[in-house]
Image (cartoon, grey):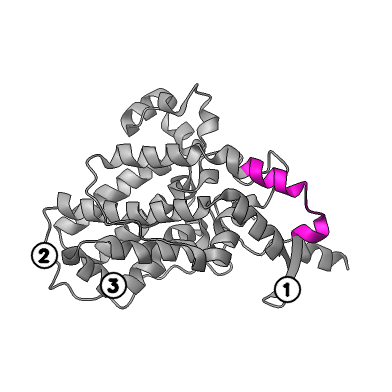
Amino acid sequence: MKGLSIIISLFIIFIICSSWGFFAHKKINEYAVYTLPPTLASFYKKNILLISSKAVDADKRCYIDSLESPRHYIDIDDYNEPSIDSIPIHWTKAKEKYQEKQLLLNGIVPWQISFSYHKLVKAFKFKDIRQIIRHSADLGHYIGDAHVPLHTTKNYNGQLTNQIGIHAFWESRLPEMFVKEYSFIKGPAKFIEDPLHTSWNIVKQSNLLVDSVLALEKQLDKSFSKHQKYSFIERNNLLIRTYSDEYARAYHTALNGMVEKRMASAIQQVGSFWYSAWVEAGQPDLKNLQKVTIDDQPLDINNKKNMGREEL
């Protein structure tokens, strides 16, 4: 019975080191393809399955690269600044003010978006199809991460407010349960004049939502008993405790479309960053590039321990 008690205390969704979970990350990259103009969309549509499946490679690298985890978040409240605007947006100036070690401890997702963007520009210039796909997938992942409010705070899993599990609840349980009710395509991809500034704006918008994400769940908890709040399902021959459908529906309603809006924004921004990288590279003709069907170096995470932080 003791062993069973340990098993059922686990939550259904296990998130590695980034946001949205595997399901939503793949959806974000997939739908971003449909925001692109026809000239660029034809290339991405040919490789949509690979770009979507590789959307989670950045997560998997948390198992093999200790430097990967900080690329997925930024704990704004760890900077002890009067406002987020006090943090220099340029990497060199931020390093001068805080030192690189401190930046890595706090997370670097807005800068990582910029780094990955410029790698994609280079890949487009050289018409390197494998690198285009790799950096498109990674860029989509980091942009998706930046759209999740709990990836902009040190209280990333509600561990400081007795709300452990809220991370996966918000970013995985809700999207998987309500995805059919979401409307994702809000408009076409647009050229981004300043990718770094845009990445910081995404983070700022997410950070403004942190208090609501936590407060709404905290308030909801008061009106549900433990029996009503949780339910049990079988997954891989294990009995797992997760948030009940009733509780998830109530939180979904209380959030008033927040998850859908952040996911839809992520989709449009991913498409816009891809499009902008292509334009900055000189709009290379990609028509004759072959479709990639095999991943040369699939990431195997079986029996490996996550080297970054984990959220249950």
Identify residue for label 3.
47
At horizontal 23% and vertical 55% (from top left) the residue drawn is: 275
Q: What secondary structure predominates along the stretch shown in magenta?
A: helix
Q: Is residue 286 left or right of residue 9?
A: left
Q: Which amino acid does label 1 sit on?
A: Leu
Q: What residue type is labelled 3?
A: Asn
Residue 218 is drawn in which quadrant? top right
- Quarter containing the N terminus: bottom right
Q: Which of marks 2 and 1 is nearer the N terminus?
A: 1
Query: Are there few (<14), some (14-19), or many (20+) residues within 10 Å of tag 2?
Result: some
Query: What kind of element bears circle 1?
Result: strand
Identify residue for label 2.
285
Q: Is residue 2 left or right of residue 96?
A: right
Query: What kind of element bears circle 3?
Result: loop
Contact between marks 2 and 1 (CB within 8 A): the answer is no
Residue 230 in the magenta stretch? The answer is: no
- Percent position (x, y) of residue 45? 27, 72
Numbered label tally: 3
Please state the extent of the stretch shown in magenta in the rendering: 214-229
Contact between marks 2 and 3 (CB within 8 A): the answer is no
Q: What residue type is labelled 2?
A: Asp
- Percent position (x, y) of residue 178? 55, 64
- The image shows residue 49, relative to residue 222, as above or below, that is below
Which label sits on residue 238? 1
Query: What kind of element bears circle 2?
Result: loop
Q: In this view, does 28 lie to the left or right of 285?
A: right
- Percent position (x, y) of residue 63? 52, 58
**Separation of marks 2 and 3 at Cα, in angstroms:** 16 Å
At horizontal 76% and vertical 58% (from top left) the residue drawn is: 229
